Amino acid sequence: MLSRWGPVMASSHTVLMRLVASAYSIAQKAGAIVRRVIAEGDLGIVEKTSATDLQTKADRLVQMSICSSLARKFPKLTIIGEEDLPPEDVDQELIEDGQWEEILKQPCPSQYSSIKEEDLVVWVDPLDGTKEYTEGLLDNVTVLIGIAYEGKAIAGVINQPYYNYQNNEKQKLKEHRSEAKAGPDAVLGRTIWGVLGLGAFGFQLKEVPAGKHIITTTRSHNNKLVSDCVTAMNPDDVLRVGGAGNKILQLIEGKASAYVFASPGCKKWDTCAPEVILHAVGGKLTDIHGNALQYNKEVKHMNSAGVLATLRNYDYYASRVPESVKNALVP
């Protein structure tokens, strides 16, 4: 009798939770590919539209890996990836077939329990923070897999391939100096995941100290609008870092209180997964006017009215966006 129940139990998980569990394993594989390309030393950099809009071998391999692995397991999904790649046979070693069992043990929020595969859109940024990746700012880099239903971001997975990178480097330096082994290296890389109505997992939620206003904004796409908007927030400090995924991680780990980007430039695949993680812990991400972002498959890819995101006190920051900035950014 038990053997007859085996396969039934396995398929009793909802489509959404199976997809998230697969995306977790696929994102872990992606992180390993990102690290491997650096280790091999040939980044294969090409410029797309400008000197700040780059693509590397890691962007290409990771997108092939994520999209092919998902499409094999979930053939009716709509998958939208950042890179325009010619169709080609994908090397078998890029395919990840596993799923994270811990996620399958979690209950699916009831409002999503009957979602079908064909109702879901997956937004993929194979390597968010490519410019930083090419410059060796490796902890800025993330792999983003966002899942949307009826135009709303509802589940997401973020892999940070070089989480603990600085700890590792410090550790190596210490070992080199003292010639003595001091404990095992911190594990390199981590995967964070979340589903609206369930929560977000894989990190320690932390808030910026009360009354502190620390803004995180773009490192490589600065302009007058961006600066004017940041200045209007009257910040105590401004962090300029790469990657939208990385900036949302700063919000949930108490390093920054608001992510302010008053410019077109970031795309739906940059914000879909991070938005879910932020919303799952009570934060808020909108465009600069306060509109929710839409993620249905027909939507334009550019977030043309910028991004405003906070873990707490959203209204404080939203109320300070200058009218001149709003007028310049049309949704």
Image (spheres, rainbow, N blue to C red):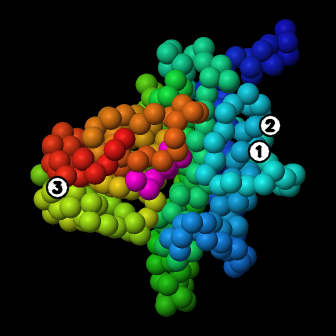
Depth check: 26 or 299 in front? 299
x and y, in percent, of residue 105 in the image: 60, 27
Label 3 with label 2: CB-CB less than 8 Å: no
Task: Tell me, yes or no, whether the highlighted magenta stretch contains residue 265.
Answer: yes
Q: Amino acid at mark 1?
A: Ser
Mark 1: secondary structure: helix
Spatial separation of the CA atoms under disc 2 and disc 1:
6 Å
Q: Is residue 281 above or below residue 92?
A: above
Q: CA distance from mark 1 to mark 3?
A: 43 Å
The magenta region covers 264-270
Q: Residues within 10 Å of mark 3 (few under 14, many from 20)?
A: many
Q: Residue at 15% of width from left, 43% of height from top?
A: 319
Image location (x, y in percent) of residue 213:
18, 56
Quadrant (top left, top right, bottom left, bottom right) of the C terminus = top left
| Label at residue 233 | 3
The residue at which mark 2 appears reads as 72
Identity of the amino acid at label 3?
A: Met
Looking at the rendered structure, the kind of residue marked 2 is Arg
Kindly report which numbered mark, 3 or 2, lies closer to the viewer in this rendering: 3
